[in-house]
Image (spheres, rainbow, N blue to C red):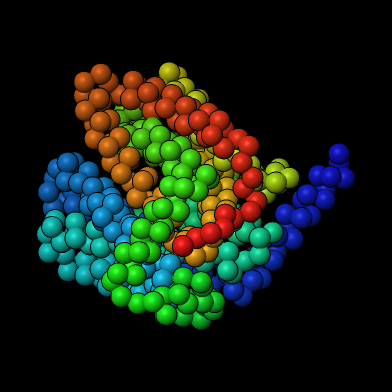
Amino acid sequence: MQGMAVHRLARVLRSYTAVARSPSYVPLWLSQLVSNFGDTLHYIALVVLVFEITGRGAAVAALAVAEMVPVLLLGPVAGVIIDRFDRKAILIGADLLRGGLALSLLWPQGVKHAYVVAAGLAIGNTFFNATAQAVIPALISEDERLAANSVSFSTGRLVQIIAASVAGGLIAVTGTSAAFGINAATFGFSAVLLFRLHIPKHAGQLAAEANRGLRRFLVDARAGLRYALRDRFVSRLLVVQSLASFAVGATGPLLVVLSERHLRQPPSGFAWLIGAIGVGALLGPFIPNALAKDYRNARWLFVPYIIRGIGDVLIAVFTPLPVALFIMFVYGLNTSTGNVVFSTTVQGAVPDAVRGRVFTLLDVDWSALRLISLALGAVMVDAVGIQPVFWMGGSLLVLAGVLGLVLLGDHDFRQPAAGVA
């Protein structure tokens, strides 16, 4: 038993070392890392700016809507573009777009300007994030893919924690402009890193060079949707993810309400809860690397849903802050574990030619159900209180995990499906 543990640890260390030395992956990883730092500063500064301009919490909440709507409207279009065109150009273009938008906030023109920037950044994020997910299998071997996603997620959370701790003092001393300027600079630096990245041409890009035009574009869009609905893994995953998104759409944004009304905490207490989630999220991705003989099974995908759902129920029952912090730590641990396994599994199980369309479809589905959940949660919290919102959300998340185990418990995730149009 001890020998097996040592062998597994050695395998994990080899994977991490290979990822850290990979000239094909490191530029993408560093670009995401730098952008995460700027994004965190930007988000906090944007919330502060909107609240300073309007003085209304509803105006701040509207930022979430401004970020979700573009994903719903452009997700299907983005997926086809990602699968038809040069993915390196898309990554760099998304960085330049986001950098320009962030730079414009050095001269803010009111709350509408802030909403336009938020929507534009969401568009850039839709293209960048789905493209990054699609290209990772072309940059990293299958054995190193889980380690690559784990390193990316964990270091991203670490950078977010650091940026969040810096943001308050930076904004207090210099105002919001410095945060927006730094974010614009990080996008520029990311674009420079990506310019040096070699991404091989993919099957969809080669086909697009031979078949251009709007008609072919629409054909590709329908083909991507048809694949998602017919493929056993993706179609069932969409069902499970829809329920999971609906479950967490309200509980995440309303955690601050639970902290104040149920846990009786001041704002500093809410910050501690967010910190506990962050620490758990930082450590979570290393769990499947260290413990999983093969992460490509339904348990690693869906058991984290069940544990997180139980956490949502429990935090609405217990009131001592130490207990709540532990629950949130476990919640963050399983959130990041699930996210890393999810991304890595989909990257391996979905063919390259349709991978961009599948990831954007998953993003659209997640955003749509999250938006509906948030609207219902806002109504429920005033009608019945905050605890029932978390009880219901947690129960639905447990149900999503169980449903995933039932629908995909016997599925073989190790081989991508074939026959993509």
Is 138 situated above or below 76? below
Visible residue check, residue 181: no
Q: x, y percentage for residue 401?
A: 51, 32
Residue at horizontal 45 percent and vertical 75 percent from the top: 207
Up-down relation of residue 391 to residue 349 (above or below)? above
Q: Residue 251, located in which quarter of the rendered image? A: top left
Q: Is residue 61 above or below residue 42?
A: above
Residue at 40%, 59% (x, y): give it. Answer: 223
State which quarter of the image contains the N terminus: top right
Indicate whether 22 appears above or below 10: below
Let me know if residue 238 appears in the view: yes
Given residues 170 and 245, the one toward you in this image is 245
In the picture provided, is 418 more to the left or to the right than 252? right
Q: Is residue 260 left or right of residue 15?
A: left
Is residue 376 toward the left or the right of residue 161 in the image?
left
Residue shown at the point (27%, 30%) measured from the top left:
377
Q: Quadrant of residue 144?
A: bottom right
**How many callouts does the rendering have?**
0
Q: Where does residue 228 sit, x and y in percent of width and height?
A: 44, 50
Q: Is residue 100 left or right of residue 151?
A: left
Given residues 72 and 180, the one toward you in this image is: 72
Q: Residue at x 33, y 68 (%)?
A: 217
Residue 150 on image: x %, y %: 59, 54
Q: Where is residue 247 drawn, in percent x and y? A: 38, 32
Q: 13 or 270: nearer the eye?
A: 13
